[in-house]
């Protein structure tokens, strides 16, 4: 497994057209993307049609087409992957909802470690709409939620991607969580 410096160099080489760099990174990237996808889909309904492997493949195909991105490091890559996975999940939820005439809204389980809500099931479309509102009010908080929730990035990784301090990420994360709880009708965890 390449170290952080080597991984960054591989990203830069890949951006510059070196196919062997992508080949060297693929196993590590795939494992990281699978970890994020498994976390996002872990508590989906049993008959959910989008599996972690399909989510990873869709995100991976979109990521490998990204030639214009100035890749900074692993965390930056995962941040962009988180945005792509969010879009894929939202599109899937919208398609599912449209297919169901009764308007069933897809619910997913939030990772307990993130502890956004006491109710572990959240309507993904409601979360997306609330996150869009938050992003309009405070783009930095919106990005923190996207990276932490959809990307599964740690406080430190989020800080690295955003170029801010871990203390700022913690503060923004706490404020954003409270705002989302209020918007989505949840209650704060003790």
Image: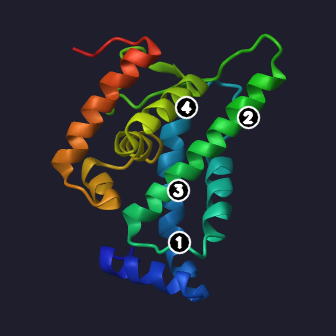
For label 1, count other residues whose C-alpha is less than 10 Å away and answer few (under 14), some (14-19) or many (20+). few
Question: CA separation, marks 1 and 2?
Answer: 31 Å
Residue 188 visible, this angle: yes
Residue that numbered label 1 is attached to? 69
Marks 4 and 1 in Cβ contact (< 8 Å): no
Mark 3 secondary-structure assignment: helix
In percent of width and height, residue 107 lies at 58, 22
Q: Which of disc 1 and disc 4 is earlier in sequence?
A: 1
Mark 1 vs 3, N-terminal side: 1
Q: Earlier in the sequence, mark 2 or mark 4?
A: 2
Specify the quadrant that holds the N terminus.
Answer: bottom left
Q: Is residue 189 above or below residue 80?
A: above
Which residue corresponds to the image point at 63% horizontal and 39% vertical from the top-left?
89
The Cα–Cα distance between marks 3 and 4, rounded to whole angstroms, is 16 Å
Q: Secondary structure at mark 4?
A: helix
Q: Residue at x 56, y 36 (%)?
A: 41
In this rendering, is residue 161 above or below 9? above
Q: Residues within 10 Å of mark 4 (few under 14, many from 20)?
A: some
Query: In screen coordinates, is 33 left or right of 95?
Result: left
- Which mark is nearer the camera, 3 or 4? 4
Which residue is label 4 attached to? 128
> Which sits in the foreground, 38 or 156?
156
Q: Is residue 43 visible?
A: no
Location of mark 3 (residue)? 81
In the structure shown, which secondary structural element does the residue marked by tag 1 occupy? loop
Q: CA distance from mark 2 to mark 4?
A: 20 Å
Residue pointed to by mark 2? 49
């Amino acid at each position: 497994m390449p170290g952080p410096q080597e991984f960054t160099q591989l990203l830069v080489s890949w951006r510059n057209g070196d196919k062997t760099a992508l080949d060297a990174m693929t196993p590590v990237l795939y494992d990281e993307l699978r970890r994020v996808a498994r976390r996002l889909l872990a508590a989906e309904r049993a008959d959910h049609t989008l599996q972690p492997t399909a989510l990873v493949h869709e995100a991976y195909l979109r990521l490998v087409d990204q030639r214009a991105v100035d890749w900074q490091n692993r965390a930056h890559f995962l941040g962009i992957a988180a945005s792509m996975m969010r879009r894929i999940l939202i599109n899937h939820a919208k398609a599912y909802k449209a297919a169901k005439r009764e308007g069933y809204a897809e619910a997913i389980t939030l990772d307990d470690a993130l502890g956004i809500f006491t109710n572990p099931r959240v309507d993904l479309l409601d979360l997306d709409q609330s996150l869009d509102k938050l992003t309009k009010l405070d783009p930095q908080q919106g990005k923190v939620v996207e990276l932490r929730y959809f990307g599964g990035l740690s406080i430190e990784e989020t800080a690295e991607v955003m170029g801010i301090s871990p203390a700022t990420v913690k503060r923004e994360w706490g404020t954003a969580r409270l705002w989302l709880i209020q918007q989505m009708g949840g209650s704060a965890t003790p």
